[in-house]
Image (cartoon, helix red, strand yellow):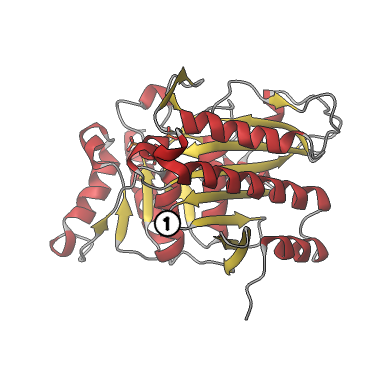
């Protein structure tokens, strides 16, 4: 059967009453912008887009040229359609208002324009992550406080992985769906409807170089996985770490697995490594809608009340059983301490 396009999928979601015309347009615009980012990343050294931009972002991280280019592509694409009240990005300290010359819509868009950008120069997959919220009623000039809504209120979330194929994974809260870019036609085509993350897995993703800095329950959990057939879990586990969250999550969405960026002594004062609003929340929404689980090791990510636009949190997500065991170890350790 001929695969359906993203546009057809969005029209069907509208007809089913699951999204409105404005949200449909928003997703179309984001997907179009991501096609442009895919073109820019694909050019590699030939496009003059590799290397540092010579500036730092709001978090004090060196920006890559492609971070800046991707951010501009997303901002420009989303400015004029009338579907947004404002945008916020990893690359900008404050929300970006919609220019006065354009109509405003009822949605708030947050994104990490190019996640895993340290991988760009070595030609490893990178991605874009986005989250969509409703702008609170009566707010025409959204401020940071209007973005600080728990992940449970997200209307849509998605990511695009720029790998051997460019793939969009999307949820509106009715399952998680995958679209693959047909480069000749220029359209995203539905490649998997209602993807499922198996409850059990034998594969985990974590940056093992941080092991000595982890908290005791994390040491315990990973120690048990590493012990393999001789340990309490009684089976061998495999490990993968791309260091592009989008690529690691996409592997989990494709064949299962579990991903951890836990708290450790080096990043404790920051609250974690990954950003809640445009990394953890959208990925948690996507993973839960695919039947997986997502916590901070203590709480469900989607229920956190955000306190800052660039807030960081620990992230445990993927196959339900493993997230539950690791979370249980942390809660148990907290209980034992109190
Ligand atoms: P950035 O967007 O700044 O490149 O961060 C990448 C994130 C995430 O994509 C990845 O899982 C993690 O940072 C990798 O961190 P380590 O380098 O500490 O392994």
* Mark 1, residue position: 164
- The residue drawn where x is 72% and y is 23% is 143
Say whether residue 141 is left or right of residue 186. right
231, above or below 142, in the image = below
Residue 305 in picture, x, y percent from top left: 60, 34
Give the camera-side residue of 197 and 44. 44
Give the camera-side residue of 83 and 149. 83
- The residue drawn where x is 46% and y is 18% is 55
Q: Residues within 10 Å of mark 1 (few under 14, many from 20)?
A: few
Say whether residue 86 is left or right of residue 112. right
Q: Quadrant of residue 132?
A: top right
Give the camera-side residue of 50 and 22. 50
Residue lying at the far front of the rendered structure: 46
On the rendering, which quadrant does ligand 1 occupy? top left
Element type at mark 1: loop
Residue 113 in picture, x, y percent from top left: 55, 37
Say whether residue 338 is left or right of residue 207. right
Give the camera-side residue of 193 and 324. 193
Q: In which quarter of the image is the N terminus?
A: bottom right
- The residue drawn where x is 68% and y is 38% is 109
Say whether residue 283 is left or right of residue 232. right
Residue lying at the far left of the rendered structure: 230
Q: In which quarter of the image is the C terminus?
A: top left
Residue 108 in picture, x, y percent from top left: 72, 36
Res 277 visible = no
């Amino acid at each position: 059967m001929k695969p359906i396009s993203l546009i057809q999928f969005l029209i069907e979601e509208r007809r089913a009453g699951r999204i409105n015309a404005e949200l449909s347009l928003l997703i179309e615009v984001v997907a179009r912008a991501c096609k442009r980012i895919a073109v820019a990343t694909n050019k590699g050294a030939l496009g003059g887009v590799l290397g540092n931009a010579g500036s730092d972002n709001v978090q004090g991280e060196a920006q890559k040229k492609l971070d800046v280019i991707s951010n501009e592509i997303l901002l420009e694409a989303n400015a004029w359609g009338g579907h947004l009240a404002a945008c916020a990005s990893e690359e900008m300290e404050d929300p970006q208002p919609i220019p006065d010359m354009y109509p405003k819509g009822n949605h708030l868009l947050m994104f990490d324009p190019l996640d895993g950008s340290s991988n760009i120069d070595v030609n490893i997959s990178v991605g874009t992550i986005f989250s969509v919220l409703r702008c609170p009623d009566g707010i025409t000039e959204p401020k940071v406080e209007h973005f600080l809504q728990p992940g449970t209120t997200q209307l849509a979330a998605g990511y695009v992985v720029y790998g051997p194929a460019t793939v969009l994974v999307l949820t509106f809260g009715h399952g998680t769906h995958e679209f693959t870019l047909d480069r000749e036609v220029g359209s995203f085509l539905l490649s998997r409807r209602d993807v499922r993350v198996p409850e059990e897995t034998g594969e985990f993703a974590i940056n093992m170089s941080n092991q000595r800095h982890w908290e005791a329950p994390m040491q315990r959990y990973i120690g048990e996985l590493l012990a393999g057939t001789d340990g309490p879990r009684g089976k061998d586990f495999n490990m993968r770490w791309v260091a592009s969250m989008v690529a690691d999550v996409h592997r989990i969405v494709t064949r299962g697995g579990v991903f951890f960026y836990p708290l450790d002594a080096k990043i404790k004062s920051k609250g974690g490594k990954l950003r809640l609003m445009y990394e953890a929340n959208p990925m948690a929404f996507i993973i839960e809608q695919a039947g997986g689980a997502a916590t901070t090791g203590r709480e469900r990510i989607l229920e956190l009340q955000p306190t800052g636009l660039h807030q960081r949190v620990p992230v445990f997500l993927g196959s339900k059983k493993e997230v539950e065991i690791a979370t249980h170890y942390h809660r148990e350790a907290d209980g034992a301490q109190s």
